[in-house]
Image (cartoon, rainbow, N blue to C red):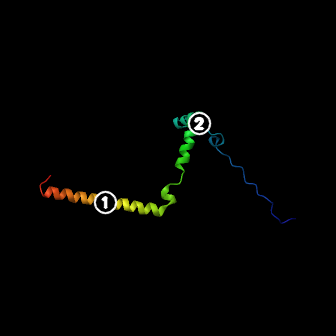
């Protein structure tokens, strides 16, 4: 007799429930109907593809992170300084009863 195992093992058959063997078709929700309508109109389908391409683009901050970080720091510093100086100016005007 041969002592080598069989080349492949058969797994026992699994009895799946009926709802898994024959699932219901997907429901016709509002989103699916709108998507089918957009796919049916060539201009809307092209607009959808352009929107997807625009959404998947690489942004400037991803291409040039250092320039973006320095620029945002400068903008935040200028805005914060302007707000502080403006607040101090208004406080000066209020204490001198000019407002």
* Mark 2 neighbour class, 10 Å CA radius: few under 14, some 14 to 19, many 20 or more: some
Residue found at the far right of this picture: 1
Q: Quadrant of residue 8?
A: bottom right
Q: Position of residue 93 (x, y in %)?
A: 16, 56
- Taking 99 as reference, is 47 left or right? right
- Taking 34 as reference, is 82 left or right? left
Q: Where is residue 12 in the image (x, y as percent from the top left)?
A: 72, 52
Toward the viewer: 25 or 28? 28
Q: Residue at x 57, y 43 (%)?
A: 49
Residue wearing tag 1: 80
Q: Is mark 2 on a helix, strand or loop?
A: helix
Residue found at the far left of this picture: 97
Q: Quadrant of residue 48?
A: top right
Up the image or down, 80 lies above or below 28; here it is: below
Closer to the observer: label 1 or label 2? 1
Q: Position of residue 40 (x, y in %)?
A: 59, 33
Q: Position of residue 44 (x, y in %)?
A: 55, 36
Toward the viewer: 77 or 3? 77
Q: Earlier in the sequence, mark 1 or mark 2?
A: 2
Q: Which residue is drawn at 59% across and 35% down?
A: 42
| Quadrant of the snapshot with the N terminus | bottom right
Is residue 79 visible in the rendered image? The answer is: yes
Up the image or down, 80 lies above or below 24; here it is: below
Q: Are marks 1 and 2 in contact (CB under 8 Å)?
A: no
Q: Is mark 1 on a helix, strand or loop?
A: helix
Q: Marks 1 and 2, Cα distance to the nearest angstrom?
A: 48 Å
Residue wearing tag 2: 39
Is residue 27 visible in the rendered image? The answer is: no
Q: Residue at x 54, y 51 (%)?
A: 57
Toward the viewer: 40 or 13? 40
């Amino acid at each position: 007799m041969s002592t080598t195992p069989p080349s492949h093992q058969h797994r026992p058959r699994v009895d799946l429930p009926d709802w898994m063997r024959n699932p219901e078709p997907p429901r016709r929700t509002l989103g699916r109907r709108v998507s089918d309508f957009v796919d049916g109109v060539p201009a809307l389908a092209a607009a959808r593809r352009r929107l997807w391409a625009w959404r998947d683009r690489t942004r400037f901050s991803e291409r040039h992170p250092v320039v973006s970080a320095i620029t945002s720091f400068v903008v935040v510093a200028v805005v914060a300084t302007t707000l502080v100086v403006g607040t101090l100016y208004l406080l000066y005007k209020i204490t001198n009863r000019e407002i």
